[in-house]
Image (tube, rainbow, N blue to C red):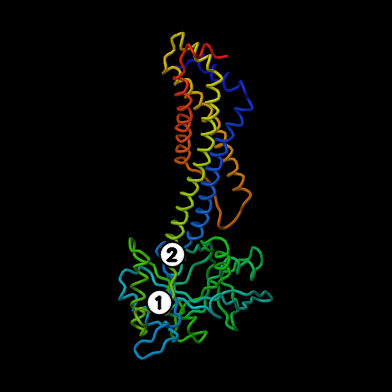
Amino acid sequence: MFDRDQWNEIYATLSRNKLRTALTAFGVSWGILMLIIMLGAGQGLKNGTLQMFSGRVANSVFMWSMFTSKPYAGYQEGRRIQFTNDDIELLRTQVPDINLISPGLQLGGWRGANNVSRGDKIGAFEINGYTPEAKDVKLLQIPKGRFLNERDMTDYRKVCVVGDIVADELFEKGEDPLDKYIEINDVYFKVIGQFKSSLSGDRAENEDRSIYIPFTTFQRTFNKGNEVGWFVLTGDDGVSATSVEEKAKQVLKKAHSVHPGDVRAIGAWNMEREMTRFLNMFSGIQILSWTVGTLTLLAGVIGISNIMLVIVKERTKEIGVRRAMGATPLNIIQQIILESMVLTTIAGILGFIAGVFLLEQTSQLIQHKFFANPEVDFTIAITALLILIISGVFAGIMPASRAVRIKPIEALRTE
């Protein structure tokens, strides 16, 4: 039942010394503010990182050839491994868990830029040879035209799909690049489509500065024989990328006479493993945020408890009068704990609002690929509220216990 007199008394008690009340409440507000800021900032870092990974299939694996580090089967260490077209079929037949295989080649080596021209316009871009599966592996968006298909591969067509940045730099503003020709190393390729990366940040820009041509056309046009630079693999639904990676490595090592224990001959980047590593790191950050925020909040709660002890001492005579007039110890305890809870809750809500406001301002001011949408979800908000209520109860327990130990006769004699 709502008791107006009781709430008026709480207000009068807390407003009796406004400066002391404000300074005490600041400790709790600061604690909840730090908790919200740290949890929100950690979530922002997590969101930014997940956005970077969102442009790839979750169980994808990138594999490339390197140099052996152990002698094996009559070969010395330091031998360069070269993937070939035969490995494509080997992986398809011997690793049944693989869903998609997309071999790749790049002109000029990894991250190598090549001059591409159209009329009087020229730019330096990455030239990659890919199969049609690359679209699904890389989750590319095709706003114009189409992607490479099997007919392009079998007919060795000199066609290409260009990234957004390539289209912007080689064509006039508003010009449709479809069915136009661009020149790569004195060879003309017809533009059949335009793609946009699903990645974010620098990686999206690198991909959008790329030109994709049919893998078979790349091999024939640029004299690569049956060489393969790397593979992009994805596993079937429910199959982990780590499992696909290990099985594929075993098949490739056997095919190229590589020591089974050689960990340097074949390089690999595993999407699943990288995501797990980052998620574990962010779990640690969240635990640290809760620890620091809760300890800071605890310091504020201890401050409130100490102030309530002072208030109880100042109100010793008042408490004695209440006891003499028939107030039970439970009435005294309820009053003290309620005052503590009100002060703690109000201070905490103010700190919570300030924290959310600062997070919102930070989100608008900081635009970075590793930081996106710092937020505090509903569950955390409810948890913080429960912590505040429980903290208010605990902050009032000791002062309330001292209050009920006061004997009415001794209290009435107190000046």
| Numbered marks: total | 2
Q: Position of residue 165 (x, y in %)?
A: 60, 66
| N-terminal-most mark, 1 or 2 | 1
Q: State the residue at coordinates (61%, 28%).
A: 20
* Label 2 secondary element: helix
**Residue 4 makes an appearance in the image:** no
Give the Cα distance between marks 1 and 2: 18 Å
Q: State the residue at coordinates (39%, 64%).
A: 59
Q: Position of residue 312 (x, y in %)?
A: 52, 21
The single residue placed furthest to the bottom in the displayed view is: 74
Q: State the residue at coordinates (53%, 30%).
A: 306
Q: State the residue at coordinates (43%, 63%).
A: 57
Amino acid of disc 1: Val
Q: Position of residue 327 (x, y in %)?
A: 44, 12
How packed is label 1: few (under 14 Cα within 10 Å), some, or many (20 or more)? some
* Label 1 secondary element: loop
Amino acid of disc 2: Met
Which dot marks residue 263?
1
**Residue 304 makes an appearance in the image:** yes
Q: Is residue 269 above or below residue 222?
A: above
Q: Which residue is mark 2?
A: 271
Image quadrant in which you'd find residue 37:
top right
